[in-house]
Amino acid sequence: MRQPNEIDFWRGFALVTIFVNHIPGIVFERFTFRNVAISDSAELFVFLAGWALRKLVDGPAKPLSARYLILRLEGRAFTVYLAQLVIAQLAIALLAGASLLLDAPFLLDWNNASAIFADPVRAHLGLVALTFQLGYFDILPLYVALMLVSPLIALSYRHARAALLPVSLAIWAFALAFGVNLPTWPVEGAWFFDPLAWQLIFVLGFLLAGEDGIGGLARRYRKPIGWIALPIVLLGVAAARTDFDPSPIALPEPKLFFVFDKTFLSPARLLSSLAIVAVFAGSFGAISRALPRLGAFLSLLGRNSLNVFCAGSLLSLAGQVFRFAYGGDVVSDAFIVMFGLVVMGAAAWASEWRERLRAKTSKEPVA
């Protein structure tokens, strides 16, 4: 298994903060960085997914062939798709069981789940097609969409390098200018994370992970870029602490370029997330030396991000139900967070134990 490293560490950090943030009202939510920034861990998670894609595309020794690359990436998209189906069904079962156990039928309406019980035939078709998404279970559908087009991103970089970023920017600007998003069904609406907009931060993660191009440029001038980014981070802190959010009524068209919109990854959120990355890039070494166990634990989570994300999503929903049943205070919220971290750590450990067992078995001679 990989040694603790900066990418796994920050991916683990994102997974923990997403887990906490998906339990509305929990005391520890106020200590996550979305309370001191315009952006949150969703941007960091997608950015690092693009970064990981670049490392896979370049390969440890030599770049992967186009054929193998397509099969590998589409296989990963299918794995994430299956994970989304499993955790969505488990979440539905959790809500149904809680509603019976607590005699609280209104729990069936939580997190956009009401269509499942009111119109199960069409809603289950929507679940399979990813056009119906439960609240707080909408990041993996975005990840599936991004992984489906990831071979196009990777091959475009190889054969039309200069066009990749301009095309990505144009798609993002088009989505914001005209409010273009994928529709949901059977419930009317649109995806919470618009793939047409969020592909930009995925592509930026992909490009910045490289040793050449803008990635190489960012490395050469990392310190000056960090100092330039620092005021942007501080402005984000001020906006978050004062609950500043531009009023759409007072803004010119197209308004999505000026509001702090998460669905369409507005420029303010994008700039905030990139500034945070610029300021904290390279800090893993100091963190791991000062807090080695924390660095190792978060890296463990990050190495096994899909399994940990699935566990964290279900734990967040369980935490919501627990707070409803027993109330929310510092003690119960601390129990939820500690229990969640233990289970997420166990999920990561079990994932690596399975891989070690598989590797050991494959090396043993056949009798």
Image (cartoon, rainbow, N blue to C red):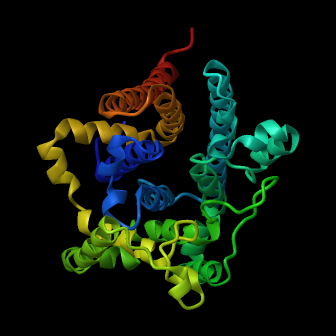
Vertically, is 153 above or below 49?
A: below
* Residue 3 picture location, percent across and down: 29, 41
Q: Is residue 266 left or right of residue 85?
A: left
* Residue 35 picture location, percent across and down: 34, 58
Can residue 303 be seen? Answer: yes
Can residue 160 be seen? Answer: no
Number of marks in picture: 0
Residue situated in front as seen by the camera: 217 or 204: 204
Q: Quadrant of the N terminus?
A: top left
Vertically, is 356 above or below 367?
A: below
Vertically, is 170 above or below 85?
A: below
Res. 275 image quadrant: bottom left
Q: Residue at x 59, y 54 (%)?
A: 143
Q: Residue at x 55, y 91 (%)?
A: 252
As drawn, the residue found furthest toward the top would be: 367
Q: Is residue 175 left or right of residue 187?
A: left
Residue situated in front as seen by the camera: 71 or 269: 269
